[in-house]
Amino acid sequence: MTYRDLFEAALRERIAAGGDPSEIARLMGLCEGRDAFARMQEFARWLENDPFNCGRCGAAFWAASVPHGEDDEALCQWCRLTYPAVTFEPVPGWALTWRR
């Protein structure tokens, strides 16, 4: 799951919660992508304040420690740094060959 999916779900939850009409209108604009700069600012604020669960191992982590883009997968530091090294195969079937 990407940060974009999680961010849009969080925006929809805040809209559904109701409140000040001007704030709801602002959030709707962010959801629809009317103002890219405002969306970027809100995304950065959201990353700093919300804890996440890793998409692979399920561990809780804070994403604010490392810069992320909306299209990045929501992964903890461990999965983000080690998973490519663990699953990398120089040639398809290489790992299977050595397991036999």
Image: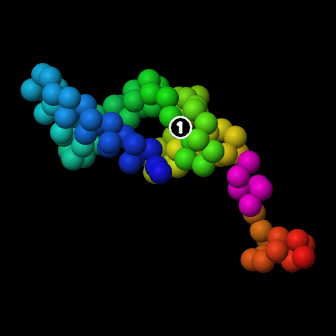
Instruction: Find residue 85 and report its horizontal and vertical position in percent.
Output: 76, 55
Residue beneath disc 1: 53
Q: Is residue 8 magenta?
A: no
Mark 1: secondary structure: strand
Q: Residue at x 70, y 52 (%)?
A: 83
Q: Identify the residue shown where x is 50% and y is 34%.
A: 52
Q: Is residue 69 above or below residue 45?
A: below
Percent position of residue 82, x then y: 74, 48
- Residue occupying image coordinates x 38% and y 48%: 5
Q: Main secondary structure of the magenta part?
A: helix
Q: Which of the pair 59/48 is nearer the observer? A: 59
The answer to whether 97 is drawn above or below residue 2 in the figure is below
Q: Could you tell me which quadrant the C terminus lies in?
A: bottom right
Q: In front here: 90 or 39?
A: 90
**Which residue is more in the foreground, 27 or 67?**
27
| Residue 84 on the magenta span | yes
Which residues are drawn in magenta? 82-87
Residue count near mark 1 (Cα–Cα under 10 Å), binned few <14, some 14–19, many ≥20: some
What x and y, as percent, mark residue 4? Answer: 39, 46
Q: Is residue 62 above or below residue 85?
A: above
Q: Residue 27 location in percent, x, y? A: 21, 34
Which amino acid type is shown beneath numbered disc 1?
A: Asn
Which residue appears at 57% of the width and 32% of the height?
A: 60
Q: In the rendered view, does 15 fall on the left or right side of 51?
A: left
